[in-house]
Image: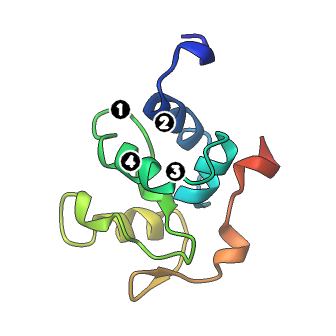
Amino acid sequence: MKPETLNFFDKVYEVAKLIPYGRVTSYGAIAKYLGATRSARMVGYAMNGSVGKDVPAHRVVNRKGLLTGKHHFDGTNLMQQLLESEGIEVFENQIQNLEKVFWDPSQEL
């Protein structure tokens, strides 16, 4: 599919699929990369709807590194478990060393 024919959610999914293993990004960083700076919440809605689309939604957190989307994952701690399985340290629903594991699509792509 050509990028110009993708809807906003599909564009979000395409960016999220590029987040490297062991790294995280934020809803706002994806929105900014897509030229929709004020649409972080829409990126969150897209992540909520990404089930079954092979999108690593667990790698998208809020700007402070909080696992704000965790209640959309099956199981009580699945989002945290997925992140920890990639070597990301999580304590009390927050990514530790966020600046070390943060992936900014505007700088990386």
Instruction: Report the Cα–Cα distance between label 3 and label 4.
Output: 13 Å
Which residue appears farthest toward the bottom when viewing the image? 92
1 and 3 marks in contact (CB < 8 Å)? no
Q: Position of residue 8 (x, y in %)?
A: 49, 32
Query: Which numbered disc flags the more N-terminal residue, 2 or 4?
Result: 2
At 35% from the left and 32% from the top, the residue drawn is 53
Q: Residue extending furthest left?
A: 75
Above or below: residue 31 compared with residue 77: above
Task: Between label 1 and label 3, give the one nearer the viewer.
Answer: 3
Residue ID for mark 4:
47
The mark that comes first in sequence, 3 or 2, is 2
Disc number placed over residue 13 in the picture, else none = 2
Looking at the rendering, which quadrant does residue 1 occupy? top right
Find disc 3 in the rendering and name its residue.
39
In the visual, does 95 lie left or right of 73?
right
Element at label 4 = helix
Residue at the spot 50% in from the left edge and 68% down from the top edge: 62
For label 2, the crowd category at 10 Å Cα-Cα, with few meaning under 14, some 14 to 19 and many 20 or more, is many
Task: Answer few, some or many: residues within 10 Å of disc 4's Cα (few below 14, many 20 plus, some between 14 and 19).
Answer: many
Where, quadrant-wise, is the C terminus in this rendering? top right
- Disc 2 residue type? Tyr
Closer to the camera, 30 or 86? Answer: 30
- Looking at numbered disc 3 in the image, what kind of residue is underneath it? Ser
Residue to which mark 1 is pinned = 53
Against 2, residue 87 (above or below) is: below
The residue type indicated by label 4 comes to Met
Residue 6 image offset from top left, x and y in percent: 51, 20
Indicate which disc, 1 or 3, sits on the residue closer to the N terminus: 3
What's the residue type where badge 1 is placed? Answer: Lys
State the SS at label 2. Answer: helix
Are the residues flagged by discs 2 and 1 in contact, CB closer than 8 Å? yes
Residue 10, horizontal then vertical, whole percent: 46, 29
